[in-house]
Image (tube, rainbow, N blue to C red):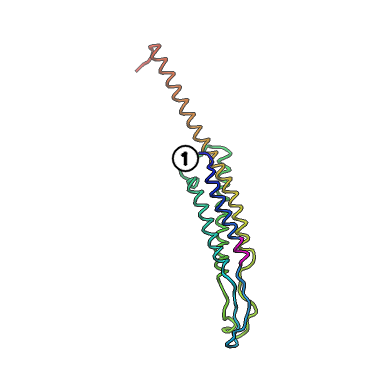
Amino acid sequence: MGVSISVVAAVSFLHLLAFVLAIGAESRRSTGRVVPDEYDDRTYCAYDSNASTAYGVAAFFVLLASQALLSGVTRCLCFGRGLAASGSRTCAIAAFVLSWVTCIVAEACLVAGSARNAYHTKYVGYYIKRDLTSCAALRKGVFAAAAALVLVSLVASLVYYWNYSRAATGGWVKHQNEGGVGMTDYGTGKGKDESGGTATV
């Protein structure tokens, strides 16, 4: 199995798109300010755009699609043709684990950040009989951490695919050579038997 440029390009594009969306989510985090109600004495939190939540959810699905694509091409390392025992196989396994660990943590950050960003404090000041002093908001850095992990996952995924392709190709060539040697020996032995008349049944 050789390295496919189209697979590398697709995985890189999807990971980088998820990275850009995560950065966009970080920069567009929803913030609120305490404002008085114009009709009574209540105070409430007025929030700006919820674009950060949309960006976070989009990044989640884009990253998941990239991982699913690579896992489908390589058959998730567990199915299909066996890999030749070599340093490439060891590197492929290590990079595979790292890519999925970083992907899962990044996905968790994206989901948690999107959910928290969508949570808004409203008329709490009225219900607890005091004025609001602050509004609930997503802590800074959650989406940024997800973006950093997306980049680590991208590097690990490409290293995994590269080493997987080398190990898969090496194993196939090895078995082909072994099969070719066996057929050659068989043909040579058979020729001797026929020419020398020493073949036995």
| The residue positioned farthest toward the left in the image shown | 201
Place residue 186 in its image quadrant.
top left
Position of residue 121 relative to residue 84, above or below, is below
Where does label 1 land, which residue?
81
Give percent across and percent down for residue 91.
Answer: 58, 43
Extreme residue toward the bottom, this view = 40
Foreground of the two, 26 or 191 = 26
Residue pictured at 45% horizontal, 22% vertical:
184
**Horizontal and vertical percent position of residue 46:** 60, 77
**Which residue is rendered at x = 61% and y = 74% of the image?**
136
**What is the secondary structure assignment of the residue under circle 1?**
loop
Answer above or below: position of 73 versus 119.
above
Count of marks overlaid on the render = 1
Q: Is 24 within the magenta?
A: yes
User: Residue at 50% of width from left, 49% of height from top?
Assistant: 71
Up-down relation of residue 171 to residue 153 (above or below): above
Quarter of the image where the C terminus is located: top left
Based on the picture, tell me whether residue 182 belongs to the magenta stretch: no
Q: Which portion, as a residue range, is magenta?
A: 23-28
Q: Position of residue 122 (x, y in %)?
A: 57, 78
Question: What x and y, as percent, mark residue 170?
Answer: 53, 35
Within 10 Å of disc 1 (Cα), the crowding (few <14, some 14-19, many 20+) is some
Residue type for callout 1: Arg
Q: Is residue 33 left or right of residue 69?
A: right
Task: Give the prevailing secondary structure in the magenta stretch.
Answer: helix
Relative to the observer, which residue lies in front, 182 or 15? 15
